[in-house]
Image (tube, grey):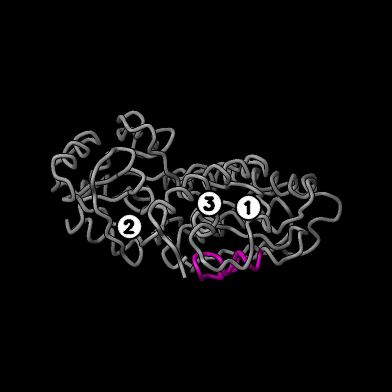
Amino acid sequence: MTHTTRRTFVLGALALPFASLSTRALAQAGFPDRPLRIIVPLAPGGSADAVCRLLSNGLSQVLGQTVVVENKPGAGGITGLSEVARAKPDGYTLGYSLAGALTVAPHIATRMPYQMSDLTPVSQVVAVPEIIVVNPKLGVNTLQELIAYARANPGKVNFGSAGNATIPHLGGELFKRTAKIDIVHIPYRGSGPALNDLLAGQVQMMVSDITLVRSHIEAGRLIGLAVAGPARVSELPKVPTTAEAGVPGMVVSNWHGIVGPAGMSPALLQTLHGAIRKAIAMPEIKQRLEKEGADAVASSSAEFATFLAKESSVWGGLTKELGIKWD
């Protein structure tokens, strides 16, 4: 996604010394008998790309086959996912996507080369809860103090994002509506420039992936007010959730998930789900994810489908209200 959040997701070397695993117990008869490929519809270097490469190493061990990651960015993730939609439903071509490409882009793209029914949900892999952060110069230390300040100073608080229709942008808009405050969106070309201006005080707040701002919170350069997730993050134990801070309707995650072409068999989905669940539970992978504030999920196809429908409803309604469209 050209607007998709770009962030530094420090995972270290991706070639991990995985333990030898029994592989064929998970696989249905004959699958896999050749390498798999996972298309990431984003440019190299972002968190989705890094986590997908980390996961692919684990899947290679579990399935006993090479898993190749291919980056095919463009059109908000539509370019890469359209190739997945056209592939055979045999499990050898999958897509690894951020939330926006699956639950935002379909609502705002004026020309879609495929429908969401052309894709099969395979598994949500991780959840990356967003966090509301402010520059210390603003003089607020809690979420309620931020809300009170914004109400007393309508239109004076600016929030930055990686660009229009990114999850951090929509998260900020959701916060604005949930808390009933008047704050102003400032879009940037990527999360890096937005973060730089937040640190410099050019914008006062962000709804950000935890992975992007955790080190700045720990160093005191930013103040974390609330985690927009169901639970506190172990790496930032003193930061409350939005529900604990009095805004229970503010829940936002820039999650990652795997999809495949329509028509994948239940047996194949079960095999892939089992492989993903086993790979994501490897201590080396789990510890790397937890260190960065990402939660391993590894949901089933049915669970992911239900989750996608709920997320799509939330973001579809909000983008319609905001009048966002991509030509």
Residue 5 spot, x, y in % from top left: 40, 59
Q: Which residue was labeled with disc 3? A: 256
Q: Kindly report the distance in space between the C-alpha atoms of the residues bearing marks 3 and 1.
A: 16 Å
Q: Is mark 2 in CB contact (under 8 Å) with mark 1?
A: no
219 vs 47, left or right, is left
User: In front: 140, or 326?
Assistant: 326
- Provide the secondary structure element on which disc 3 rests: strand
Q: What are the residue bounds of the magenta stretch?
A: 69-84
Residue 30 spot, x, y in % from top left: 85, 56
Amino acid type assigned to the residue bearing label 1 in the image: Gly
Residue displayed at 28% across by 56% down = 185
User: In front: 233, or 73?
Assistant: 73
Q: Which residue was labeled with disc 1? A: 58
Residue 204 spot, x, y in % from top left: 20, 51
Query: Is 75 situated above or below 28?
Result: below
Q: In the image, is residue 85 part of the stretch drawn in magenta?
A: no
- Provide the secondary structure element on which disc 1 rests: helix
307 vs 24, left or right, is left
- Please tell me whether the stretch drawn in magenta is mainly helix, strand or loop: helix
Q: Nearer the viewer, mark 3 or mark 1?
A: 3
Query: Is 263 situated above or below 178?
Result: below
Which of the two labelled residues, at mark 2 and mark 1, occupies the earlier sequence position?
A: 1
Q: Which residue was labeled with disc 2? A: 161
Binning the other alpha carbons within 10 Å of mark 3 as few (below 14), some (14 to 19) or many (20 upward) gives many
Residue displayed at 43% across by 45% down = 291
